[in-house]
Amino acid sequence: MQLITGEPKWEKTNVTNLLRNRQSGNYYARVRVNGKQKWRSLETSVFSVAKLKLGDVEKDMRASTLLSQPQRITDRDWETSVERFIAIYLERTKCDPSLAPNSKLRREIAVKAIIKTWPALPSRDARRLSVSECQTWAAKAAAQGTGFIAPNAKTVRTGMSVSAYNKCVDTLRAIFEIAREHGMMYQNPARNISKGTIRQKLLDLPSSGQFQSVVNHIAAAGARWSKDCADMAQILAFSGARLREATALRWSHIDSTKNRLTIPGTKSNASERQIPIFPPLAAHIAEMRARRGNEPASKPILRVSTCLGALKSACRHVGIKTLTHHDLRHYFATRCIESGVDIPTVSRWLGHSDGGALAMKVYGHLRQEHSDAQAAKVQF
């Protein structure tokens, strides 16, 4: 389409913030955020489609602008606006040295989800927020979610997952607590929002013999990295390390004199710990050393970053449920408890900082089963 000289480039529509480019025929969103005009293509030349996309794009533009410029102060009512306290929350998150990068990212994602599901919240006066409004948001967020669909997703979830919803509730409460610190609220209006109950994962783990069969199948598969994948599976299962902790292991982390292995704290600074080199772990480390020669102390112990494909194939061959990297951590904890190790000790080996509360929740039933089995052996 050729523009006539003097003809305006943009054509207004009867929908606020929706304009059409005369040259391309495509529709654009024009949104004013904090006094600045923002444009975004709706990537369609069909008016009805553009109208449907406009609302989501407006919300996203406002949320993105808020997160990318958390410290700006342009609004007349900035001092009492929720936007101000969101900005403080994000800044504290950014500067907190005790938070791991993934924890910071999850907090930012939660803020985005809150703004997506409650777009009017940033501009609201914190002093005028009510408990009922928070309850209404919670019900809508849990039932409808943000509408995000992951690329190539095989299934589409309705509403938020329980963990994502709970993170949003915690984040909203934390933001309002900052408003309370600044004297804008007497009580936190999100205090009575009920959090969802996360169903405990049912552990379906292999026996020692089945696990050894899985490892043998991986090692004998004949692929280039088969032996290295088998090494990873055994290091994870014999140490209880998280995946990122295991891939961060170096030969220098092994103290043969004290029979200790230092697990790097990749999740948080507090998660760095030392564990005993248990007999199966010691035997496997010795076998790896003999096979790979005298590698420098700075070299990674593991040569691969994942063994999921190998695990899946081997589990199918052995005839058991497919294992994940984290299942091997559960396998370690289960074997320790069934060997008679108390849960607080297992918790420390796993790198938990809660004194065993999480381990008791996940593995407490194993301790009881072990106790019952041992009790059956008692004779008088």
Image (tube, rainbow, N blue to C red):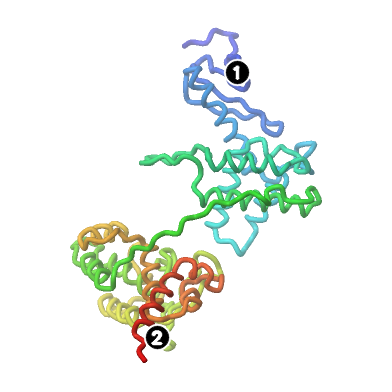
The quadrant of the image that shows the C terminus is: bottom left
- Three-letter code, disc 2: Ser
| Callout 2–callout 1 Cβ contact below 8 Å | no
Q: Indicate the quadrant where residue 54 lies.
A: top right
* Closer mark to the observer between disc 2 and disc 1: 1
> Crowding near pointer 2: few (<14 within 10 Å), some, many (20+)?
few
Is residue 336 in view?
no
Give the image location of residue 41, x and y in percent: 52, 26
Label 1: state its secondary structure: loop
In the image, taking residue 350 as reference, residue 96 lies left or right, namely right
Give the image location of residue 103, x and y in percent: 55, 57
Number of disc labels: 2
Q: Which residue is mark 2?
A: 256
Depicted 92 relative to depicted 25: above or below? below
Q: Earlier in the sequence, mark 2 or mark 1?
A: 1
The front one of 245 and 207 is 207
Give the image location of residue 140, x and y in percent: 58, 38
Q: Which residue is mark 1?
A: 15
- Three-letter code, disc 1: Val
Give the CA distance from mark 2 to mark 1. Answer: 72 Å
Mark identifier at residue 310:
none
